[in-house]
Amino acid sequence: MRWRSRAPIPPACAAVFTVSAGAFPIAPQAHFPLLDDWSNPALSSTLMNAATTADVRQHILDTAKPIMLCKGFTGVGLNEILAAAGVPKGSFYHYFGSKEAFGESILESYFDDYVAHLDELLVRGPGAAIDRLMRYWTQWQQMQMGNDPEGKCLVVKLGAEVCDLSEAMRAALERGTSQIVARLAACIAAALDDGSLKVDLEPQQTAAMLYELWVGATLIEKIRRDGEPLAVAMASTRRVLGLTGAR
């Protein structure tokens, strides 16, 4: 099941505004009432009960992610997010003290999901460690060349935009990307241990270099839109890892 908001969504984002099953366990047509009158006990009780059965905070974050992937951070107003999520402004400020704190939480939530995916792919995925690593780069290439904004990289989308505006968001990006590099380094180390990687490499340095290569290539791909930067990144990755076969 995929949940779709009943609130109006900007046309540029309408095709991608969905939340995956399990992220917000409510019926497909359910929505939070737009309440601004917290003095009404019945209405307040209704919203508080909803908060006990569904994670309103996570719902707001899940709603905002695809919008920000489409529009960026500064291009999205709180009213747009609240209308799309179907929650009152009072509820927003209950969970987030400011838009900056909200942006930091968006990034933390994004990296939590991303790292969980990495663990499934790089640690528990099938095949030798080098095959799991190359599967990651292949998925990256396919997603960034696709037309689904939800599959795009939030690091690329927000990195250059927010790092000079918010130290808290910059730090969240640094923490999150460090986690990604650590997972990649662990997979490279595993590939050295199981013999599937034949080149003598330092895992941490190699992981950081490759990740930075792909982030940069993804940024240039947004400019060129011809697939060439990502193709070059893949060829460079294979060369660094000493892969000449079908992998």
Image (cartoon, rainbow, N blue to C red):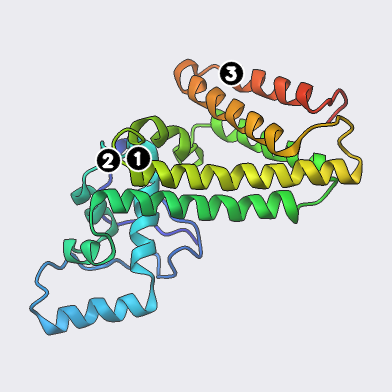
Spot occupied by residue 161 in the image (x, y as percentages of width and height): 34, 32
Q: Are marks 2 and 1 in contact (CB under 8 Å)?
A: yes
Q: Residue at x 85, y 45 (%)?
A: 128
Depth check: give the residue in front, 211 or 144.
211
Image mark for residue 178: none
Q: Quadrant of residue 196?
A: top right
Q: Is residue 116 above or below residue 198?
A: below
Q: Nearer the viewer, mark 3 or mark 2?
A: 3
- Mark 1 lies on a secondary structure that is helix
Q: Is residue 157 left or right of residue 218?
A: left
Task: Indicate which disc residue 13 carries.
Answer: 1
Where residue 2 appears, as percent x and y from the top left, is 47, 58
- Distance from Cα at disc 1 to Cα at disc 3: 25 Å
How far apart are the alpha carbons under marks 3 and 2? Answer: 30 Å
The residue that disc 3 covers is: 229
Question: At which x and y percent is residue 17?
Answer: 38, 48
Q: How many C-alpha atoms fall within 10 Å of the one at disc 2: few (<14), some, or many (≥20)?
A: some
Q: Are marks 3 and 2 in contact (CB under 8 Å)?
A: no
Question: Which residue is disc 2 drawn over?
Answer: 10
Q: Is there any visible trace of residue 144 in the rendered image?
A: yes
> Crowding at label 3, few (<14), some or many (≥20) Cα neighbours within 10 Å?
many
Q: Is residue 14 visible?
A: no
Instruction: Indicate the secondary structure of the residue bearing disc 2.
Output: loop
